[in-house]
Amino acid sequence: MKKVFVALCMTGLVAAVTSCKTSNNAATSTSELNGEWKITEVNGQNITKTKNPNEAFIGFDVAKKSMYGSTSCNRFFGELNADANKGTISFGNVGITRMMCEDIKTEEQVLKAVNETKSYELKGSKKLTLKSADGKVLMTLQKRNK
């Protein structure tokens, strides 16, 4: 009976340690989203220098569950919902400024991709892809250096 009890205790200990390790990895992975990411591609097309004065980017604050950025003209902001275990990400209640822009094409592409984003993939600590529900790459981003 004592051997069975010890075996059950060991099994419980291993399960507890394993679940804690998984939880820590998930938090670390999600926190790697923090910071600002330059948008380099939208729907497979390179984002080139537009006639607008700003660089297109997205910023994440995982602790505050918020996102913000620039479409290259207007600024946007909203809620961030990310789950590292599932690799899911979505944005809710997105707001945007409404300034006049010379080049609206990049803005339209970025906003459409933000709206359709359902998952993400981190490649190292410098490359991020945002994907649609069917796995299509919507945006490729590169970590901005501060």
Image (cartoon, rainbow, N blue to C red):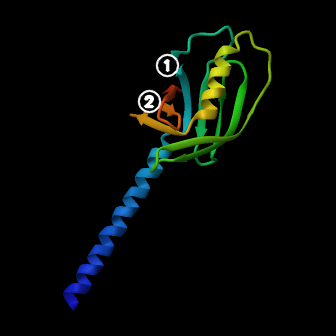
Q: Quadrant of the C terminus?
A: top right
Query: What amino acid is found at the position of numbered circle 1 in the picture?
Result: Gly
Q: Is residue 56 left or right of residue 139?
A: right
In which quadrant of the rendered view does residue 10 lie? Answer: bottom left
Mark 1 or mark 2, which is nearer the start of the sequence? 1
Foreground residue among 70 and 136: 136
Q: Circle 2 sits in a helix, a strand or a loop, which is it?
A: loop
Asked if 61 appears above or below 53 in the picture, the reply is below
Q: Is residue 110 left or right of residue 130?
A: right
Determine which residue is flagged by label 1: 44
The span from disc 2 to disc 1 (Cα, nearest Å) is: 18 Å
Q: Residues within 10 Å of mark 1 (few under 14, many from 20)?
A: few
At x 59%, y 38%, the residue is: 60
As drawn, which residue projects farthest toward the front?
Answer: 134
Q: For the residues carrying marks 2 and 1, which lies nearer the camera in this image? A: 1
In which quadrant of the rendered view does residue 125 lie? Answer: top left
Q: Circle 1 sits in a helix, a strand or a loop, which is it?
A: loop
Kindly tell me whether residue 94 is visible in this rendering.
yes
Asked if 65 appears above or below 101 in the picture, the reply is below
Q: Is residue 112 left or right of residue 46?
A: right
Does the residue at mark 2 contact the one at mark 1 (Cβ under 8 Å)?
no
Determine which residue is flagged by label 2: 126
Residue 130 % position (x, y): 51, 33
Residue 39 % position (x, y): 55, 23
Asked if 89 appears above or below 18 in the picture, the reply is above
Q: Residues within 10 Å of mark 2 (few under 14, many from 20)?
A: some
At x 60%, y 25%, the residue is: 57
At x 67%, y 21%, the residue is: 108
